[in-house]
Amino acid sequence: MKSKTVALFLALISSLVGLSLGLIAAEKKPAPAPLTKPTLKVDATPVSDLKSPVVISYADALEAIRPAVISVYSSKTVREQVPEVFRQMGAKGREQKQRGLGSGVIISSDGYIITNNHVVEEADELKVLLGDDREFTAKLIGTDPKTDVAVIKIEAENLPTVTLADSAKLRVGDIVFAIGNPLGVGQTVTMGIVSATGRKVGILDEVAGYEDFIQTDAAINQGNSGGALIDARGRLVGINSAIISNSTGNIGIGFAIPINLASFIMHSLIETGTVARGYMGVQTDILTPDKAESFGAPKDTKGLLITDLPADGPATKAGLKREDIITGLNGKPVTSGDELRLAIAQTPPGTKVTVNFLREGKLQSTEVTLTKRSEESTPNGELLPGLLVEPLSPESRKEFRIDDRVDGLLITDLAENSPFREIFHPGYVIAQVNREPVTDLVSAKQALKDGRNIALVYYRGTYRYIIFQR
């Protein structure tokens, strides 16, 4: 009994001590400051009370432009491939017709139509169906695989046309409409918004293309390619080009070529039949904060670090040097290599551009006169219809086991519908055309003549002459 009394007494003493210590600690600990209420932006007005009136139909905006969006039907003859040993024996594969479907946009009343390169690529025949059921045979004016733009023309007058907008002013959230002939069901209009601008998704990487896509969730399906992307005022802002999908259907990720870019390509194709892109002659690297500091610029500097310049290039002639930091072009900030490449490519050769740059931390500027990209001087490397060539390189010599003493043009590809498919073969090296040595596409084309031609060809250690008609 005595031990229980002692235990209770000790427990009571312990509790009193703990309480006293807690009171002392509470007296020493400062009271927490009262919480500050966040300031919130609140707009309690109903949607219908906003300044912009509620739009219940876009029919009026679309009515004028719909007749200018047409269907494009392509066809090409494809020959079944036959093993080389049988081709040498004279065997030929069977021919069959392949048909394609796309859309296009009339941009002039006398019949110029803009569409996608992949809609008309390798086509033997192009047909255009207008909204009033008139059908025309179209002529190919020019194509640009690097932007997936093509221009065709029909012989007609007083055609309905579109009004072009400034696609640089598009904003994410703007309402847009996709118009075309999806899946061959007839002209269809779908609605969405601009999901993003300036998208680069790698669709044109195989041709080292120029991507600056408008992304939209307006439904785009097969057959919409080459059709119109329209803003809420009925103006053309883009040319529908591609979708990303796990199947062949639309999942709300579609891409259109901005009309500013497509228009530049279109004018060049109509005026010259090719695309003349500007060339500045710089190789650049992304500018990180550490690199900026290393080259005498503030760590938060945005721009591109020049890593190399050809000795005879336009940038070198204008005074730019390795380790300069490009910060702007014609007064507009430049923050990525793709951005600079696209801006230069959309500027005609011979144009003077102002380059803003930092050198040892000091802001300077210089004028660069752009020249023509060498790769554009011989578009597609096409020597004959469907026959693509390129100059020999150390890599191609190694791949095809071509002796260093051999010089000429390597045949890299032959289209399935090329009339020369049974005569030439990828891997052949064309050393001479009509007894003239050829080492580039320009000299080879100059050596060609109408009618009968003769080529000296090297293949697997042997030279032989091939006679062909042009």
Image (cartoon, grey):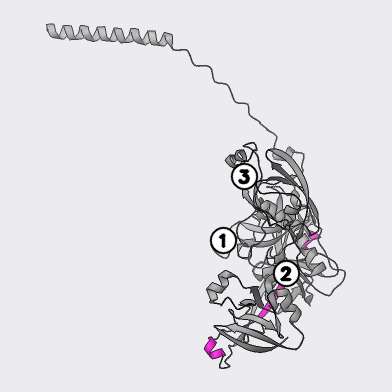
What number is the disc on residue 405? none
| Residue found at x 72% / y 69% | 143
Q: Does the magenta stretch include residue 90?
A: yes
Label 1: element kind: loop
Does residue 273 sit above or below 317 in this rendering? Answer: below
Q: Quadrant of residue 125?
A: bottom right
Nearest to the observer: residue 383 or residue 415: 383
Nearest to the observer: residue 387 or residue 435: 435
Does residue 341 sit above or below 86 in this rendering? Answer: above
Q: Which circle, 3 or 2, is nearer the viewer?
A: 3
Q: Is residue 24 magenta?
A: no
The reply to whether discs 2 and 1 touch (Cβ–Cβ < 8 Å) is no
Q: Which circle, 3 or 1, is nearer the viewer?
A: 3
CA separation in Å, label 3 and label 1: 34 Å
> In the image as oriented, which residue stretches furthest toward the bottom?
89
Q: Residues within 10 Å of mark 1 (few under 14, many from 20)?
A: few
The reply to whether discs 3 and 2 touch (Cβ–Cβ < 8 Å) is no
Label 2: element kind: strand
The residue under label 3 is 287
What number is the disc on residue 245? 1
The three-letter code of the residue at mark 3 reads Leu
Q: Can residue 451 be seen in this view?
A: yes
The residue under label 2 is 143
Nearest to the observer: residue 191 or residue 331: 331
CA separation in Å, label 3 and label 2: 35 Å
The three-letter code of the residue at mark 2 reads Thr
* Earlier-in-chain disc, 2 versus 1: 2
Give left or right: position of 67 versus 11.
Answer: right
> In the image as oriented, which residue stretches furthest toward the left?
1
| Residue found at x 78% / y 64% | 266
- Magenta-tinted stretch: 63-91
